[in-house]
Every structure is written in C-alpha cells, then in structure tokens.
C-alpha cells in the first residue's frame, strides 16, 4: 500500500436514534490530501481495544478536535454541566492510545481537544471555560457566525525558536485559527511549549523525549489546509514522519508501493 495507515480518534454522537463513532470530514480530507496517508477510524471502546496490536499495524496517530471537553475528573477538577459537554468513551480511548503511541515511537499529531488530551494523558491539567478567565483572549470566538468565520485565521501565536515546531513553520509569529473553551493550565513535565498566544496560553506543545514526531496544536490546521501554508506544513511534516516510520517498520523505501 502506497499510503501508510494512520489511526484517527472518533467522537460518540447520536444520530437517527443510534450512537455513532465518527470523525469530522475536514480531518480525514487533510490526512489524505496534505499528509498523503490512509486514515482509519478507531471506535471509542476504551480498554476493550488492543492498542498494542493496533500500533503494530498503523504508522501514525491523529487525535482530532471535538465539540466535547475532557472530563475535569481526569485531571483533578470538578465535573459541572457548564464545562461540558463530555465524551467519557472518547477519553477512555484517546488517553491510553496517546500514551501507547508515544511509548511505541509512533508519530502523533494532536489537534485542539487532542492537545488537551495529550496534556492530560501525560499528567497535566486544563483550564475550563477559558472565556471567563480575566486577562485572557477570546479563544472560543463568536459562535453565532458561519463556520468559515468561526474558523477564520484571526490571532497570533509566537513559535519557540528552540522547538520542533519552528523547524516546520519557522520561528517568530504566525497567524492561526485557534478556537477552544478549554486550554492547558499546568503543562505536563513531559511536554515542551512550542508556541504561546499573546496572553501566554500554550497553543502548541511537543513530547520532548519522544522517539518520533509527537506534536499537539491548539488551532485547526485541518480547516484551511488547502489554502494556508502553515497548515499544509504541519500535515506534510506529520505525513513525512509517518512514511519514515512505515519504511523503518517494513524495511521498504518510503516511496515504494
């Protein structure tokens, strides 16, 4: 197979009176068109899944964003209706999958909720309802607008010149489409801040000891990947890391069929 397989997280949602395990289309299209990989959706079945077996088969993991939030009880906070909605089945799947991917040396890209899950999976904590914190930017944005307006590239983050993200998009300031109600509070000791917003909120982080690509971003590169160079570079770099892993695992050149 020319395109290596990647595992993609899903959400549990209700449609037509059924529960579905699904992922937003933008992530899948970005994976295929910009990263040139083959996405495989992973159901939210928690410890019933053989993560070791899965990671022996795929060459990358993509943790998507979501409309739900990580349960505060997983990082020492209190669960309230105001800080929801929650998706406990997703949490029970993504957190161990993230830890396993890192320990197996599998390339990992985590987006929006995915960055928050990455931090929690490795022992960090989150801010809930960031829009209510004095002195912080309006990270959630205006909700009563079109999706293009909601996901517009609208604020600046500063990229750490000493991090891996700088090697992908360059150091200094870039413009992103960050959109979130939760954010990193206490950064995991296993993570390194790669970019921060003007108010100091961590907008990207990497696993400093990882054996492979392991990066999370708070913004949404999947949404404008066809038009925005920063977004393209992120997915292209992830795809390149996936192909390197595939070549090393199979002993076949990355460009072979």
Image (cartoon, rainbow, N blue to C red):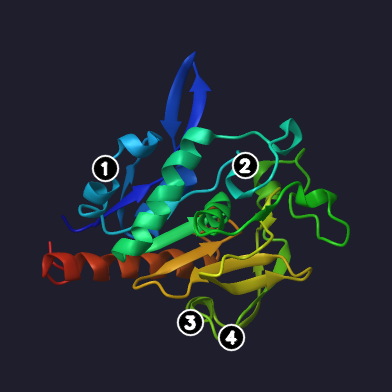
Q: CA distance from mark 3 to mark 2?
A: 36 Å
Rendered location of residue 46, percent (x, y): 39, 37
Q: Of marks 4 and 1, which one's residue comes earlier in the chain?
A: 1
Disc 3/disc 4 C-alpha distance (Å): 8 Å
The Cα–Cα distance between marks 2 and 1, rounded to whole angstroms, is 25 Å
Residue 231 vs residue 185: left or right? left
Q: Marks 1 and 2: in contact by CB < 8 Å?
A: no
Pair 3/1: label in front: 1
Residue 74 versus residue 233: which sits nearer the camera? Answer: 74
Q: CA distance from mark 3 to mark 1?
A: 34 Å
Residue 161 is marked as 4
- List the single residue furthest toward the front: 76
Instruction: Determine whether 76 is above or below 16 in the image.
Output: below
Q: Is residue 59 left or right of residue 129?
A: left
Q: Secondary structure at mark 4?
A: loop
Q: Residue at x 79, y 68 (%)?
A: 199
Mark 3 highlights which residue?
167
Cβ atoms under marks 3 and 2 closer than 8 Å: no
Q: Earlier in the sequence, mark 3 or mark 2?
A: 2
Q: Quadrant of the C terminus?
A: bottom left
Q: Which quadrant of the structure image shows residue 120?
A: bottom right
Quarter in which the N terminus is drawn: bottom left
| Front in this rendered view, residue 191 or 136 | 191
Say which element carries label 3.
Answer: helix
Distance from the alpha carbon under mark 4 to that under mark 2: 35 Å
In primary-sequence order, the first of circles 3 and 1 is 1
Circle 3 crowding by C-alpha within 10 Å: few under 14, some 14–19, many from 20? few
**Residue 102 locus on image (x, y percent):** 37, 63
Q: In terms of secondary structure, where does tag 2 sit? A: helix
Residue 223 tag number: none
Marks 4 and 1: CB-CB under 8 Å?
no
Residue at the disc numbered 2 = 73
């Amino acid at each position: 197979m020319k395109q290596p397989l990647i595992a993609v997280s899903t959400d549990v949602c209700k449609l037509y009176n059924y529960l579905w395990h699904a992922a937003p289309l933008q992530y899948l299209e970005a994976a295929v068109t910009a990263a040139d990989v083959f996405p495989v959706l992973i159901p939210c079945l928690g410890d019933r899944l053989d993560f070791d077996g899965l990671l022996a088969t795929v060459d990358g993991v993509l943790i998507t964003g979501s409309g739900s939030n990580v349960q505060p009880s997983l990082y020492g906070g209190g669960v309230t209706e105001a800080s929801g909605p929650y998706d406990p089945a997703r949490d029970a799947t993504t957190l161990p999958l993230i830890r396993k991917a890192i320990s197996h040396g599998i390339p990992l890209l985590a987006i929006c909720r995915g960055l928050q899950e990455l931090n929690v999976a490795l022992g960090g904590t989150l801010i809930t309802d960031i829009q209510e914190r004095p002195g912080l930017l309006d990270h959630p944005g205006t909700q009563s607008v079109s999706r293009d307006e909601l996901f517009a590239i609208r604020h600046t983050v500063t990229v750490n010149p000493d991090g891996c993200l700088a090697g992908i998009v360059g150091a200094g300031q870039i413009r992103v489409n960050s959109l979130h109600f939760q954010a990193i509070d206490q950064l995991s000791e296993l993570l390194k801040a790669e970019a921060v917003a003007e108010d100091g909120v961590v907008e990207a982080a990497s696993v400093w000891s990882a054996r492979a690509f392991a990066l999370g971003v708070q913004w949404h590169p999947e949404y404008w990947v066809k038009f925005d160079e920063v977004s393209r570079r992120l997915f292209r770099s992830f795809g390149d890391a996936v192909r390197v892993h595939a070549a090393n695992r199979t002993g076949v050149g990355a460009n072979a069929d």
